[in-house]
Image (cartoon, rainbow, N blue to C red):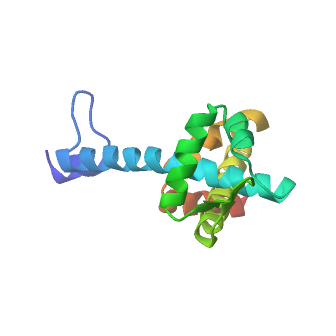
């Protein structure tokens, strides 16, 4: 494959170079792994902000998962240093967890704003942003921001 072909989109039937394709798929797998934790910290932050605490039952209901699934993920958040749980109370974010929640919330807003700017209806933009926000690189997110500032 010539250098110019490597830079442009592949023609039908051509595959990107193996390292390029592996890097792309690796990025997607990493984003999928982090997306779950990002959704949890964002929701926990929102629940604490609106009601003072985030109970595992509320987290499970709002994410549409079973209580045991929520407990398992909360345990992972605790191992990662993003959350703490208090007996007979709820789940609370550490400073690192709050920082991550703020970052995810900001990414979500930029993606929603971009989708709205190109004519996507609000509810569809909110739903689609839930997936896109985890997969968009910082480079692409910065480009979204520049585009929105020119509007």
Q: Is residue 21 left or right of residue 84?
A: left
Q: Residue at coordinates 56% horizontally, 58% vertically from top-left?
A: 141
Q: Nearest the camera: 88 or 3? A: 88
Q: Residue at coordinates 74% horizontally, 52% vertically from top-left?
A: 88
Q: Is residue 43 left or right of residue 32?
A: right
Q: Residue at coordinates 22% horizontally, 51% vertically from top-left?
A: 4
Q: Position of residue 15 (x, y in %)?
A: 22, 36
Q: Nearest the camera: 65 or 11? A: 65
Q: Is residue 26 left or right of residue 75?
A: left
Q: Position of residue 94 (x, y in %)?
A: 63, 68
Q: Is residue 140 above or below residue 5?
A: below
Q: Nearest the camera: 7 or 20? A: 20
Q: Position of residue 74 (x, y in %)?
A: 58, 50
Q: Nearest the camera: 36 or 70? A: 70
| Residue 59 found in image quarter | top right
Placement of the C terminus among the 4 image quadrants: bottom right
Q: Is residue 119 above or below residue 84?
A: above
| Residue 121 appears anywhere in the view | no
The outermost residue toward the front is 87
Placement of the N terminus among the 4 image quadrants: top left
The outermost residue toward the top is 13
| Residue 137 appears anywhere in the view | yes
Q: Is residue 19 above or below residue 68?
A: below
Q: Residue at coordinates 60% horizontally, 57% vertically from top-left?
A: 144
């Amino acid at each position: 494959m010539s250098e110019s072909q490597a830079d442009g989109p592949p023609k039908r039937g051509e595959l990107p170079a193996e390292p390029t394709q592996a890097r792309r798929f690796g990025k997607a797998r990493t984003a999928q792994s982090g997306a779950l934790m990002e959704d949890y910290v964002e929701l926990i932050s929102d629940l604490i902000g609106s009601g003072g605490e985030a109970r595992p039952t509320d987290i499970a209901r709002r994410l549409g998962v079973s209580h045991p699934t929520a407990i398992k993920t909360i345990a992972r958040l605790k191992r990662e240093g993003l959350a703490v749980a208090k007996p007979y109370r709820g789940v609370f974010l550490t400073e690192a967890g709050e920082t991550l929640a703020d970052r995810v919330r900001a990414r979500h807003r930029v993606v929603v704003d971009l989708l709205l700017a190109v004519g996507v209806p609000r509810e569809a933009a909110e739903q689609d942003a839930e997936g896109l926000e985890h997969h968009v690189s910082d480079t692409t997110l910065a480009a979204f921001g520049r585009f929105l500032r020119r509007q």
